[in-house]
Amino acid sequence: MPPKSKLTHQDNKESTQSDYIGNPMEETHFLGVPLDINNKTVSNPNPLLTTGFRFLLSRTPNITYFCQSANVPDISLGEMEQPTTFIPIKHPGNSFTYSDLEISFIVDENMENWREIHNWMTSLKNVEDYTEFESNTAMHTSDARLMILNSAMQPNLEIEFKYIFPKSLSGVNFTSSTDDTEPVICNATFAFTSYDIRKI
């Protein structure tokens, strides 16, 4: 019976190293992401600021200056299940849903910005008579833009909302039970068809 060959420590080391010979990119990255946890190099380390925005709605120009908050709505994609003998296989569905756009704004003393949305809503439906309804359906919707600012408060991204119209407008509450003078803040909710995001 021939003697067994001995594998030296050096041979084992060379064998282990040969298993990892290949594309260096594949060894240090996975799908373009560095595998080294100490590698924290990013192209832009500045975070997105909650105060870095400006909301523009052509149908209600008095909203822009007084707008206090706005959101990038949620999106959801439906799913379909393919029955199998075992667990079902999931596939992307046919439905694509956007949540509502919500803003809050300070009401000016003439209530112009509040009345802009109110009058817009009443023009979409016959409230008291037939004269309020806007027969030109092209006037029922508008386009809106949410400008995202960078850390230098300069325009960085633009989100364009298409075919937007108001769904709800909060009431105006007055009170004399406080000594503090606080502005009235109202909320408005808008529905829209879709939105696009582009780099400026």
Image (cartoon, helix red, strand yellow):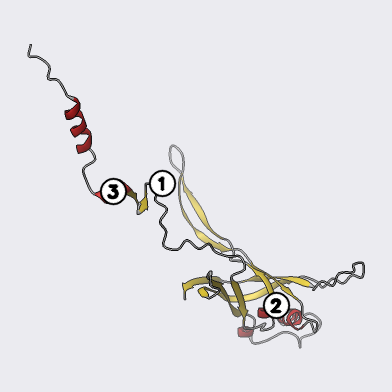
SS under mark 2: helix
Task: Judge left or right: residue 180 versus residue 148.
Answer: right
Pick the quarter of the image with the N terminus.
top left
Seen from the viewer's position, the closer of residues 200 and 193 is: 200
**46 up-or-down from 109: above or below:** above
Q: Decide which of 84, 111 is in the foreground and name it.
A: 111
In the image, residue 134 sits, relative to residue 148, either above or below, namely below
Amino acid at circle 2: Phe
**Considering depth in this image, is 163 or 48 the residue closer to the camera?**
48
Mark closest to the chain's N terminus, 1 or 3: 3
Q: Amino acid at mark 1?
A: Ile
Q: Quadrant of residue 22?
A: top left
Mark sitting earlier along the chain (3/2): 3
Quote the CA–CA distance across marks 3 and 2: 52 Å
Label 1: how many Cα within 10 Å (few below 14, some 14–19, many 20+): few
Q: Residue at x 55, y 72 (%)?
A: 149
Q: Is 116 positioned to the left or the right of 200 in the image? A: right
The residue labelled by disc 1 is 37
**Residue under pointer 3:** 26
Disc 3 crowd rating (10 Å Cα; few below 14, some 14-19, many 20+) is: few
Q: Position of residue 189 (x, y in %)?
A: 68, 69
Residue 66 placement: quadrant: bottom right
Q: Residue furthest top?
A: 1
Residue pictured at 80% horizontal, 71% vertical: 171
Residue at 76% of width from left, 86% of height from top?
130
Q: Secondary structure at mark 1?
A: loop
Pick whichever, 155 or 174, lies toward us: 155
The three-letter amino acid code for the residue at tag 3 is Glu
Within-10-Å neighbours for mark 2: few <14, some 14–19, many 20+: some
